[in-house]
Image (cartoon, helix red, strand yellow):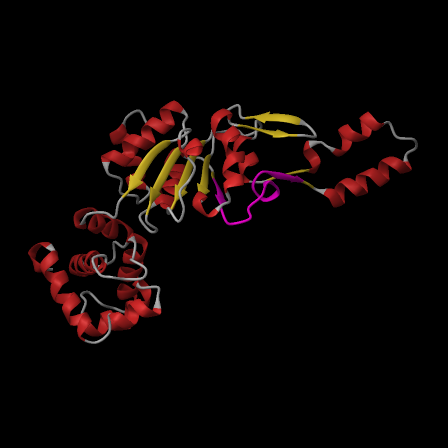
Amino acid sequence: MPASIPELQQRLAEQRYVSDRGLAVSLFIALKLGRPLFLEGEAGVGKTALAAATAAALGTDLIRLQCYEGLDISHAVYEWDYPRQLLELRLLEAGGPLDRTVAHQALYSDAFLLKRPLLQAIDPARARPAVLLIDEIDRADEEFEGYLLELLAEFQVTIPEIGTVRATERPLVILTSNRTREVHDALKRRCLYQWLEYPSFEKELAIVRVRVPEASAQLAAQVTSLAQELRTQDLYKVPGVSETIDWVSALVALGHDRVNEQAIGETLGVVLKAREDVDSMRGGRVSELLARAAGRAPGGA
């Protein structure tokens, strides 16, 4: 456990995650108080990456639950291995008359319990607390949100056949939302809250330099400026930091140490994910984009 906020930032930096103090403070408090951390913001600003970096920085496991419409308990928490239970029942029956209590204890035991991410995270048998990432909770149904309330409040789940399973060591729970819909207040009240903005030019450039160290200083600055400029445009899908990193990586792979109109035109599909957006940037828009980006970057990079 990091002893201070600067130490936490340093550990994250060692995992190539650039954190400002505000985010580090929220994460530090979540660790100290054992409270879930709810991260909300646009796609691609580093919410999911924070969970992975935190797990690595703490030297523990990352357990990820990817949310989607229709997510249910059998995929998120647990289910019973019915084929193996049926086979076990036949073996028990072959041994003679069955005692119902003995059969129940044999069939509904840990050996036949398939533990999904939420149960894995609070498993009392865990040797060390995990980082539990509940990713894109806004994509799950409201009914699933309701199920999470017990877990986030008490770090326990109830399994009818065997009773309540409670964590002996609380995991660090990080929930993310791209705000495709509003998450219920009852869920947010159980969490600490942090909104992640698109980063400033300086912070995004620092992220790019850390994540793509092989890129030239000029290329990193130019592409960061271009990404910042693209976010001011009327686009169907605004690029996130992950797209900036991919764009720099792609240009490095093509042997560029700086950008030009041709390089931008050839790689627009790396940073823009909608046909309409790519088409809108063709032709003279690329020259305009380059000129505006040059004025945005310090020193006219």
Q: Residue at x 75, y 45 (%)?
A: 83
User: Residue 163 versus residue 132: which sits nearer the camera?
Assistant: 163
Decide whether residue 268 is among the magenta residues.
no
- Which quadrant of the structure image shows residue 22? top left
At 25% across and 54% down in the image, what residue appears? Answer: 213
Residue 82 lies in quadrant: top right
Q: Residue at x 70, y 42 (%)?
A: 81
Position above or below: 106 against 206:
above
Above or below, 96 against 247 in this view is above
Residue at (51% x, 27% y) in the render: 155
Q: Is residue 70 magenta?
A: yes
The magenta-colored residue range is 63-79
In this rendering, does residue 1 appear at all?
Answer: no
Closer to us: 175 or 189: 189
Q: Is residue 259 left or right of residue 47?
A: left
Image position, residue 184 (x, y; %) = 43, 37
Which one is nearer the viewer's eye here, 135 or 97?
A: 135
Q: Where is 201 relative to 151, above or below?
A: below
Where is residue 178 shown, x and y percent of the image? 37, 47
